[in-house]
Amino acid sequence: MKLKIIIKNTTRTLLQPWQNAFNQAVELPPRRYDLDWLRVLAFGLLIFYHTGMLYTQNWGFHFKSQYLSSNIENIMLLLSPWRMGLIWFISGAALRFIIARASLGGFLISRSVRILLPLLIGVWFIVPVQLYAQMSQETGLAISYWQFYLQFFDLTNPLFEYYQAGIWPHVDVNHLWYLRSLWQFTLLLVFALPLLHHHYVQTVITRLCEQSLLIIFIVLLLPLCILKLSWPSDTFRYPMGALFLLYGYLLAWHSVFYSRLLLHWRALCVVFIVGYLIVVAGYNMIWQNSAASQWQITGMDMLYTAQRLVGVLMMLALAQRFLNHDHPKLALLNSAVFPFYLLHQSVIIGLAFYLSKLQLGGFMESLLILSLTFILCWLVFIGARRVDLLSPFLGIKVTGKYKAWQVKVGFGCGLILVSPLIIRLI
């Protein structure tokens, strides 16, 4: 009995630094409607971006339309540098609010279930259509989708011999890599909480936010540039995402930081436009030029990295200026973000695969894909949110009134379902 008490007290002492970061006895800042709107817009832009990826001539994607163009790449460069940085920043800011209201154990369980349960459904039931379209285009796959899907569950099937980069051999995340990384980064963030909440770190962040926007920009840019110079380009999106998530978490409650952005929103727009023109010029003259020197390529990498940060800061500033207010439909739109994200790329590629046979032309084909993607994702969302049993599988928060024990049982069942995925991801 004494041993149990000693173990319990020791465990409580060891976990105290982490417990202190949760369920804090502080007054939370008001809800950030600007970040809610940005979340809706950022994920909505992914539909346009991934539709555009069907038509880029020089950028790789799981499936390609027959109507390819290099000109569309110049338009895509408006979004490409900062779109994921903004999503990661918002994710970090959201975690700051969630952690302040949660307990350590409850947070780890709820976040694991709410992130990994939709991911588990996604990799087995949503993403496979992308692999089918990709293999059909690359290998001339001559079977129906349902024949393909029956073989998909066989992890040793030789059909997938050259597609083995998944969580389970050919069972890959594709566009759902964000969910996988979000869960992994969340665990790392929780591990680092005692350091992040240390008085010295918080003092440094506070003093940084009191500096000029130029100094803030330089301080935030330096780690990004160091990562870009030291990390392989094909996996750079992971440390970049982790860093922007950290920025969002550390800056979420610093109103002075957002005041700086609001004050200089016009200047940020001008810098962003100039940066975009430079990036487009560099893309065509350097990145697309096989004779470009290494210093030219490195210089463009640094400019692109700076544009990434400028884009995120500009969007935060514009949201402060124009979107910092509630709306009757905002909560509904926010709840639609997760299912839209889960479904959109598979819907886009599935539509492109079947519409390609009709030879509609680039404009009509892309217009149909965009329209039908929004419509189909919305119909699935509306249907799933009406069924409490289906909602968690698509990342929709259950709105029904349930007793505490029922909620615990639900999370317990969810944790059991995602446990094989947790083992694969750790």
Image: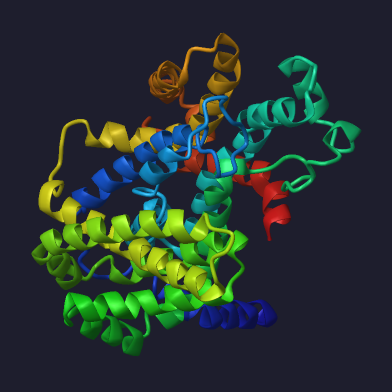
- Horizontal and vertical percent for residue 330? 23, 36
- Horizontal and vertical percent for residue 285? 45, 58
Return the residue nearer the eye: 424 or 391: 424
Q: Give the farthest residue toward the bottom.
A: 200
* Residue at horizontal 40 percent and vertical 76 percent from the top: 20
Can you see residue 17?
yes
Return the residue nearer the eye: 267 or 172: 267
* Residue at horizontal 12 percent and vertical 67 percent from the top: 259
Q: Would residue 206 be found to the left or right of residue 418 on screen?
A: left
* Residue at horizontal 48 percent and vertical 79 percent from the top: 226
333 above or below 199?
above
- Which image quadrant for residue 219? bottom left
Return the residue nearer the eye: 16 or 1: 16
Q: How many marks overall?
A: 0
Image quarter (top left, top right, bottom left or bottom right) of the N terminus: bottom right
Q: Give the farthest residue toward the top.
A: 358
Return the residue nearer the eye: 389 or 128: 128
Q: Give the farthest residue toward the front.
A: 291
399 above or below 270?
above
Q: Would residue 265 be found to the left or right of residue 198 on screen?
A: left
